[in-house]
């Protein structure tokens, strides 16, 4: 069924960058009388099928919210499992991602994360960095407010060293100092599970993004629904404040 939907996509009106807040793993587990760990495992399967679909439709950028700075508040057992699951999934999938011309990067703060973990992530992702197909960003230990603070710190340091003058600060300068430097802002933000908020995700970059909300829990999010979100996006008129 989703193949027929793909044929309806207007390639001239494709979003260049889609960002997804993958919400509902825990509720999926509760709904299906499973523990939270099972919910996260099913969530990984959903990531895989959406990435595969993104490759199929020639999407340029996809950013998924994998682990937030607020997620450290969860139980130590769940946090440790999530970190291990994310790493193992990356290692398991890197060959297939590279084969499909996917360029994968982790974006977020390096605070709290062990140096060995960060090093392993970078070493693994580097294997894909010559690819020029889908750019897949995994937002890991990511928080929009922290991203802005780190951006402002970089700019302030450049002012102190005399590299720039305070009057030179611009929107482009801020954008160029974010984790997403060099990437287009998201055209479309998808959030699953019925919640309708950003939850500290890409708060600078989503100033003019379109939003698409669904009550579907992330592990149940299908290729079909993903394509439907794009078709809905293509019906919208984006004015960017012009009229």
Image (cartoon, helix red, strand yellow):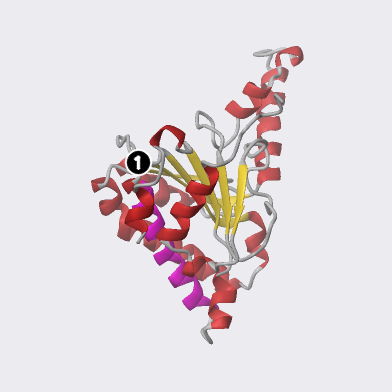
Q: Position of residue 153 (x, y in %)?
A: 70, 31
Task: Name which residue lies at 26% across and 46% down.
Answer: 100
User: Which is nearer the eye, 77 or 239?
Assistant: 239
Left or right of 117 on screen, residue 90: left
Q: Residues within 10 Å of mark 1 (few under 14, many from 20)?
A: few
Residue at left 35%, top 41%?
58
Residue behind mark 1? 58
Tell me residue 95's x, y (percent).
26, 52
The span shown in magenta is: 36-54
Res 151 visible: yes
Residue 81 belongs to the span the image colors magenta? no
Instruction: Using the image as rendered, state which of residue 84 and residue 33 is in the foreground.
Output: 33
Q: Quadrant of the N terminus?
A: bottom left
Residue 203 is left or right of residue 93, and the answer is: right
> Going 31% across and 42% down the picture, which residue do you hit?
128
Residue 81 position in % (x across, y down):
50, 70
Residue 44 in magenta stretch:
yes
Q: Viewer-proximal residue, 237 or 76?
A: 237
Between 57 and 128, the one nearer to me in the picture? 57
- For the C terminus, the quadrant is top right
Q: Quadrant of residue 87?
A: bottom left
């Amino acid at each position: 069924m989703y193949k027929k939907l793909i044929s309806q996509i207007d390639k001239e009106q494709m979003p260049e960058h889609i960002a997804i807040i993958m919400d509902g793993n825990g509720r999926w587990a509760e709904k299906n009388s499973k523990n939270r760990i099972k919910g996260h495992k099913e969530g990984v399967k959903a990531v895989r099928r959406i990435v595969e679909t993104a490759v199929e439709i020639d999407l340029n950028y996809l950013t998924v919210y994998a682990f937030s700075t607020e997620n450290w508040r969860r139980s130590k057992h769940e946090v440790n499992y999530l970190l291990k699951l994310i790493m193992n999934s990356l290692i398991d999938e890197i060959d297939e991602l590279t084969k499909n011309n996917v360029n994968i990067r982790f974006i977020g703060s390096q605070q709290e994360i062990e140096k060995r973990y960060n090093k392993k992530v970078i070493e693994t992702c580097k294997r894909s960095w010559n690819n020029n197909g889908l750019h897949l960003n995994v937002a890991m230990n990511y928080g929009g407010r922290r991203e802005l603070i780190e951006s402002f710190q970089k700019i302030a340091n450049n002012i102190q060293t005399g590299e720039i003058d305070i009057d030179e600060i611009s929107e482009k300068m801020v954008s160029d100092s974010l984790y997403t430097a060099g990437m287009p802002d998201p055209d479309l933000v998808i959030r699953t599970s019925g919640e309708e908020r950003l939850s500290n995700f890409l708060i600078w970059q989503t100033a003019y993004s379109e939003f698409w909300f669904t009550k579907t829990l992330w592990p149940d999010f299908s290729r079909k629904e993903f394509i439907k979100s794009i078709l809905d996006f293509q019906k919208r008129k984006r004015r960017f404040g012009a009229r």
